[in-house]
Amino acid sequence: MILLLMSGGCFAQWKISPGFQLVRSSIIDKNFSAAPFSGVVPGASISLTHEGDRCIHALSINYIGGSLPMSNHPEYEVSVKYFDGAYSWLYKLKKAGGAWSGGVGGGLMVLYDSRSYAGIVNNNTSFDFAASLALSGAVAYSLNNIWSLSDQMNIPVVSWMIHPPYGQESGLSSFGGSGNRHQIASFSSYMRLKNALSLNRQVGARGMFSLAYCWDYYRIDDLRAVRQAVHSGGIIYRLTL
């Protein structure tokens, strides 16, 4: 990925974007409960973007962590750690002198979501891991020289997944457990939609503040029944190097 990011030449723009967010997360893992666990937890993100004349390379990392209560029994909680990493390559589509710009392409998506259920004595941990080849698209609209809107969507096409074992002792439910199951999954058995929308304000020649909203949803239907929805809102600062 680093070599791809460096391939555009020394005259391309580099942007680094740290951010902080509050996340509304809801999870149902029917191996543990038919009722959802949901709540608000903190999160952080960072991304690196390399923009050349014809294409855009972007690498992003997001992390959230905290405890979510059960919707109808808040005394029961699940501790979650959610990691999302993505690399995208976009071929730029832009009309000269126009307010609209965008790009289409593909990339890689990696998701790791671990959960620990308090109060369950035996098998009390679970996780989902997926590394995916994805389709990506982005669009931006410049309102004026200061304000702009941007949106990007990523959809996995085929994924390599790792599942925890079922009916095993809790120690084997970790990511490195020897009893984990591996699977190549299509969109029908592992569906994920990730969309990020932001309102941007230019600050000086090299800075930009963004109010960002991201919706990240995934569903597993094969072997397991898992639903996870993540709604995050936050502030991002983009610095052009």
Image (cartoon, rainbow, N blue to C red):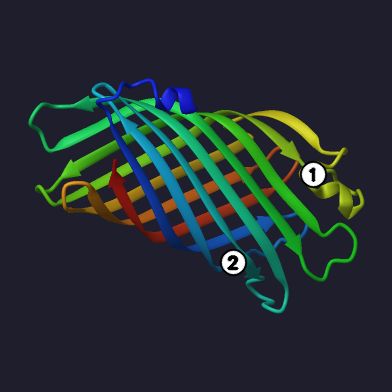
Which residue sits at x=63%, y=72%? 71
Q: Residue furthest bottom?
A: 75
Identify the residue position indicated by label 1 in the image.
164
Identify the residue position indicated by label 2 in the image.
38
Q: How many marks?
A: 2
Q: Secondary structure at mark 1?
A: loop
The front one of 30 and 129 is 129
Which quadrant does the C terminus fall into? top left
Q: Where, by quadrant of the figure, is residue 48 drawn?
A: top left
Task: Say few, some or many: other residues with alpha carbon within 10 Å of mark 2 (under 14 / 14 to 19 / 20 or more).
Answer: many
Q: Is residue 220 left or right of residue 142?
A: right
Q: Position of residue 97 (x, y in %)?
A: 7, 31
Q: Position of residue 90 (x, y in %)?
A: 35, 27
Q: Position of residue 104 (x, y in %)?
A: 34, 27
Q: Position of residue 234 (x, y in %)?
A: 39, 61
Q: Answer yes or no: is residue 31 visible.
A: no
Which residue sits at x=42%, y=44%? 47
Instruction: Say which amino acid is labelled 2.
Output: Ser
